[in-house]
Every structure is written in C-alpha cells, then in structure tokens.
Amino acid sequence: MRRPMVSSPLLSLEGVGKTFPNGTVALAHVDLAITRGKVHGLLGANGAGKSTLIKILAGALPPSGGTMRWQGETVRWQAPRDPRRAGIATIYQHIPLVPTLSAFENIVLDATGWCRNSRQDRERVARIVASLGDRFDLDALVADLPIGARQMVAIAQALAGGAELVVMDEPTASLTGDERETIYATIRRLAHEEDKAILFVSHFLDEIVALTDEVTVLRDGRVVLHAATVTLEEATIAQAIAGRAVTAIERTPRRAGAIEPRLRVENLASSGKLAPANFTLHSGEIIGIAGTLGSGRSELLQAIFGADPKATGSVTLDGVPVGRFPDETVRAGLALVPEDRATQGYVPQFTLAENIALVRRGPFINSAAEHAAAEAAIDRLAIKAPGPDALVTELSGGNAQKAVLAKWLTPATRVLLLDEPTAGIDIGARTDILRLVRSLADDGLPVILVSSEFDELLAIADRILVIRDGRLVGEVDPHTTTETDLTLMAGGTLRAPAGVAA
Amino acid sequence: MMTNHDWRRRFGLREAGVYYALLILLGVLAAIASSRGLPPYLSAENLGNIAYQASLVGIMGVAMTVVLITGAFDLSVGSVAALSAAVLVGLAGSIGFVPAAIAALCTAAAIGLINGAIVQFVGINAFIVTLGTLTAVRGLVLILTDGRSLMVANPTVLAHMLAFESTRVPIFWASLVIAIGIVFIGIRQHRLATIAAGAVISGLALAGGSALAVAIPVIYLAAFTLVMWAVLRFTVIGRRLYAVGGNAEAARLSGINVHAYKLGAFLLSGIAAGFAGVLFGCRLGALNPTALQGTELTVIAAAILGGTSLFGGAGSVVKTVVGALLLFTLTNGFNILNLGANFQGLIEGVVVVAAAAIYTVGGERRRARRPSADTAPDALPITEGAPA
C-alpha cells in the first residue's frame, strides 16, 4: 500500500455517487480532495447534492459507488461513529447539543471512562477552547449560551474528539454579523495555525470568497467548478451554481401592466426577524420573493398571514384589514402553503380528501362533495394517488405538496401565499405546480411566491422582491434580470448588516 | 365497494381487536360459568350489570377520548367527579336536586376550563397540569367535606336523586330495532363491519331475552357516546378536533382556532366528569371523600384499550366504551366466577399492555411498508398491506 505523503490530500473522493432505491440520483460523480491547512468551500443550489455528500462523509448514508480515501487508505464507513473515530467531525446547521448540560460536558460528551469531570479532561478542553480564540464559560449551561457560542462549543466538541477534518454545514446561517466574524477567525486559525482541514458549506457567496482557500461547486450531483478561491469572482461562482437555466417552464412574456391593487402591506415588521416591509400586490400579479434560507422570507409570509403573533404593521385586502390570527386571515381570503409540508402542511393521520377538506367550514361534513373536490384536485393537479381515500403520508413528496396546495383551491381564496412550494420535489411535480400557479394568476388571483429556486421566480413572477437578513433590499424586473444577478443580490456582496431590529 | 386490503384492515386486530377481545372474553366467561354449573353468564341481568358498572368510566372515557384526540391529557377526571358529587350531596338537601346538580356541573366545567386555560395559555404540559389539579381538587373535596362522609338527609330529595340514577329502562325491543336498523344500513352501504356490529348487538339482545332492562346511566352513556360519535364522524368540528391533535401547526395554518378546540375538549372532559360525579352522588345519596380515587387511570386504560393514540389525532369513542366494557367484564367475571380477586389487578394490567403492544406493533408494520413522504420523492405510492 502506498504510504501517504505529506502533500497528499487528507480525504479524497473519486467518482462517489449516490442513487436512492427509488431511482433518484442525488450524486452522480463527485471527485473531491480536501487537504490539511485549507478551508474548502462547498456550494450548490438546493438539491444539488450538498446534503447527501455531507451525509456520506459523516457516515450517515452509504455511497452507492466510487471510492473514498482517508489519509491515503480506502475506507467504507458503516455508521456515523466510524468517521468520528477516524477524525472527521460534522457540525450540522441545527447544532445537536444537549441544552441541559454544561458546555464542558457537551464537549466531552463522547468521552469514555468513568469519571464525569476529570481534571485531565478539563485541562485538555481548556487548551482546545483557548486555541479557538473565543472564550466562553465552560460551566455555563448550553441553553444559556448565545447561538454563536454554541457553534464554538460544537467546534470544540469536534476537536476534543480528535477531528482532523471538520465539516461545517452552513454554520453562519443563524448568526449575527459579530458572531460570524468570530466564527471566521476561528476557522482561519484552525486551518492555518492548527493545520486542520475544514469543509465549509454555505449559501453566502461573500463569505465563501472571503474565507475559503479553494471552492467546489456542485450542481445536479456533479462537480461543475473546482478552483482556488483567489482565481474566482463572486459572479463566476454564482454562474456555476445557477448553471444554464434548467427551468421547468418557459418564461412568460411580459404581461399587460398590473390592474388594481389588492393586498397592501404597510410597515409590516416583526422584532428581530423582519424589518418594516412595504409593498402592494395587484390582481393577477405574482410577486416573487428571492432570498436564501434564513433571510426572513418565510417570516414575511407568516407575518402577512397572521401566523406571527409578534408582527406589527398593517395588511389590508381591498382596503379591509385581514386580521391578526390565521383563523381571521383565512376568513378574509388569505391562503398559505407553508414551507415544510410535513410539519406544517398536512395532517398525517388524514386521507387526501380529508386534508383537502381541512379548510372547509359548515356544521356538517359533506362526504360526497369532499370526495368530488378531491377527485377534481387529483385531476387538476395530476396528483398520483390511489384515490381520495389514500393516506396523505402514502404519497410521494411532490404529490403530498399538491394536496397541501389543493386545499386552498376554493373560491374563498383571494390571495395565495406560497412558501417554497417546490422544495424537495421532482421536476415533473414542480412544473405542474408552477403551471397551476401561473394559470391561477392569469385568472386574476394575486400570488406571493417564495422560492430559493431563482429560475422559477424568473420564469413566472411579474416582479421580484429580494430579501436579505430580514429586510427587503430591492425590487427587480424578471425580464431584465438573470439568475446570476439574483443570486448575487440575495447572497452576495450587497449584504446589509445583520441583526435587524424592527 | 370495499377492496380486499380495506376489508382485511377493517377486520384486522388493530382496527377491530377490542371488539374481538370483548366477545372472546364474554364467550370464555360464559363457557366457564356453564361448565361449573353456575347460572348462565350471558343473562340479561348480568349484561345489564356490566354495562351499569362501566357507565361512569364510560362517560368519562368518551370525553377523555376527545381530549386525547386533540393531543392533550386529563388526569383530573376522578377528582373532578368526586368534587361534583360532593357539591351535589352537600347542596341538594338545602336547594333541591336540580339546582344542586347544575351547581355541580358548573363547578366541574370551571375546573375543566382552568385545566385547559393553563395548558393552552401558560403552555405547561397537560400531564403536569392535570396531575396538579388531580391532587388539588381532591384536597378541595376534603376541605368541603371536612374529611367526613356527606349524606342527603331530606327524604324527598333523596328519592328524587335515587330515581335519577337507578330507574331501570327496558331496552329489549329498542335494542333489537336499533340492531336491525344498523344491519339494514350496513347492507345498503355494502359495509360488512356495520352489518357485523348490528348482528352482534341483536345477538346480545336476544341472549338477554325480552326482560332485558338496564339502569338509566347506561342510557346516558349510550346517548352521550352516540352524540360524540356523530360529532366526530359527521361534523366539521369533529374533523378539526382530529386535525388539531394530528398536526396542530398545519391546523393553525389552515385557519383553525387551535386554542378554542383544545380548550373545548378540556371543558367537555370537565363536564363529563361532573356528570359522572352527579350520577355517583345519586347512587347512594351519600359521598365518602376518598370516593372515585384512581378512576382516572381506569378511564385512560379504557381509552388505550380502544386504540386511542396518546399522541393525538386518532381515536374512537365507541371503541373507548367497548374498552371500558372489557375492563368491567373482567372485574365482573372475576367476582361472579370467584376466580380469585387477587389476580384481577395483574390480569387487567397485562390486558392493557398487551392491547397497547398490538396497536403499536401493528402501527409500525403499517408504517414500515409505506415510504415516508419526504424521503422518497419519486416513489410510487404503495398500498398498505394487511396489519398484524
């Protein structure tokens, strides 16, 4: 066996692929080399394969092809503890720490032995924490620490476990500006002084450019760009992420000017989440909201819909306030398709017909009418289901999403709010949903569409508002804008200071 | 038309297990009784007795099922029933039966509202809140009674109360007519389960003979069950109760006032416990302050036997009542057949755990055969197989 040389990569992937049993190809063919002393940036749009790749590295998913070498030796992880033992630590976006234990106990959580609080461990951990550069109280409960310090605890935990490679999945998405700077400093120090390898996953182009030494961009499960960061510009990276427009539907031609104003949003804000927003939605108009995860796009829709009890400001539909709670706004004619269909969209114990009938009123259940409505929805949205009586959890993601959308397709709906209606669903279902939304708008229904698939926004929106850090930062005309521009605006250099207060 | 797998699901252990268990238990007890030369077990009198003994737990169980469907929990029902009985017995002598009963129901409703308001608006877990009210309300009973037994002294009021509780109602013809009606509905709708249910009811009525009569609490239980079953089955309110328990966030974002439904369930539970307490107070016209202790556990056991999920979103009031009947049939069988009362607790506990195991394992198997909606974006829907 070849002896690993100093300059050889710490971890290398050759032709790694992942095909799920149902035929979905998440990763087609990925080559990746991660070396010591460098921060490696990994980018890609939603569904490009980043999460799958991280799961493979962390041992949570087995690859279905290709080879993985760790320090020159071929490895096959059986379980998440294998890469941890070898020296790969993965820090997920939602940091899995035990909030009821102290920072110190979280850091040594995977330590073995009998003694709960040995002095040896304490000294070792104290040294690691000192090397991070940002001090926090080791005996504070994790629940009491600010979110930035929790990231530090997670990093310290990784290092205490002997990690040589630290994989960080969007570590800065929920941090404020100062906390981000602290994390950046720590990451640089780890790579350049402690000689660790860092794989840094992010949506934010500016931090990728500022922080990383080399960049890999994934698209459709393939590496489409790999280069040293100094040779790249943000625009080049954005181009690589977006790629040629793999748009599901054609761009609609510019339509006649919007007609009458319907939904007026004035000074709508929510403390700490949303800066005051103002805009007007016209009949038959689709406003696209372009923003990355955590940009405040979902919070904006929730505030309009009355689902955020802390929201202030006014929302009026045809001059009448819509109300402050979802039951009032629904009565006023607002409809929200939420971001996460499984936790917010459908009732898992219910059938397709029952879920579609969820918003029906009236004293009695009218089974015949509900069945007919469900059959009509199955036809109209091309839902693949055994019938109206199928449990909604039996359906695939795209079809369950169509069911969540279908419940609002009643004459009572006067404004449609869509939060990532096409997330995690296949291209066919996506096209169906976008076509339907376009045709609803053509019939006069005003629509607000949030999506991180900017090509969708460009294809069907009449105008696009860009949101970043809880603030609407600009409005663009989809007919004169490219996906690259939009990616730059939503995640690029124009970033406003974080931590917006209302 | 029912497809084959529908048919197998409807009659599978998970869906219909509690009915089988009751029928098998009745059959076994009848066989033992006849083999020992005891009087026939399935007599009208004995079946009526079982139903009578199960009526209070059944009434509370129906309301408990509604609470469980909304994803909450109510441990306080036993104490609330005792408090209601104490209010009734304490006041009836001075203000008369009907005003005292109304006062008792209002007291119980108020405690239900307090439970619900603390759970919903302070956000404390329902288990903890009602564990607290379980203890506190029992303490209130002790304070009100000063730790002594209460009695109604006024003989006219006492007679009124006894009449309210122990009147016997002949039900042979009524139950036969209802059973035949159910069979006809089943035939018209091609629903084998309905036909079977009607056949079983008419069989039991015929076994009981034309002298079949039950105490009036059984009628109250039947009426309450029927109303709640209809509300859950046929009204939008019923569906929203299930939706609130199945996925509160989805319900909220569909414009359902989640607070109102959860609060309403607690209110119903309080009123049902209050009514059970009124019946209990009327039974003897007297109340021991430690009465009905531990009833809440029997009530919850009945709901679990009936397959109600402790996580909300699923449950059937009819099956809860059958679960209560099952528990009291066990008790009754041990007494009548003299099978050793010491074994009773052990057997009951095993039955409850076994039932929960059947529901859990059956549920897992069904889930395992079905791709989760969000991990299999392109998978074709797979029809569910037969449960265990």
Image (cartoon, coloured by chain):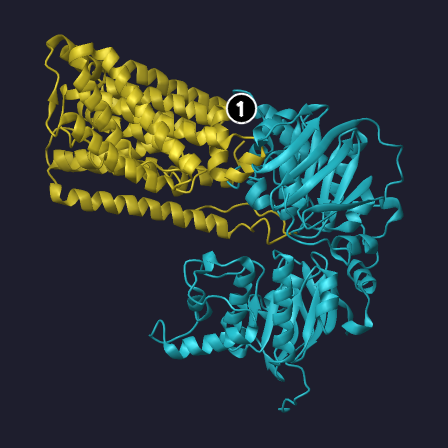
Which residue occupies 65% across, 64% down?
A181
Which residue occupies 54% across, 74% down?
A83
Question: Is residue B26 in view?
Answer: no
A176 with respect to A126 (left or right): right
Which residue occupies 28% across, 15% down?
B102
Chain for colour cyan: A
Chain for colour yellow: B
The residue type indicated by label 1 comes to Ile
**Quarter of the figure that contains the N terminus of chain B:** top right
x and y percentages locating residue A200 in the rendered image: 66, 68
A392 with respect to A490 (left or right): left
Q: Is residue A282 above or below residue B218?
A: below
A115 with respect to B150 (left or right): right
Q: Residues within 10 Å of mark 1 (few under 14, many from 20)?
A: many
Which residue occupies 22% across, 24% down?
B52
Quarter-wise, where is residue A420 in the image? top right
Question: Is residue B238 in view?
Answer: yes
Q: Is residue A41 above or below residue B125?
A: below
x and y percentages locating residue B288 in the rendered image: 13, 28
Quarter-wise, where is residue B133 in the image? top left
Of residues A305 and A131, which is closer to you in this image? Answer: A131
Per the image, label 1 sits on a secondary structure element best described as: loop
x and y percentages locating residue B302 in the rendered image: 30, 36
x and y percentages locating residue A304 in the rendered image: 65, 35
Q: What chain does mark 1 sit on?
A: A
Q: Is residue A329 above or below residue B129?
A: above
B66 with respect to A25 (left or right): left
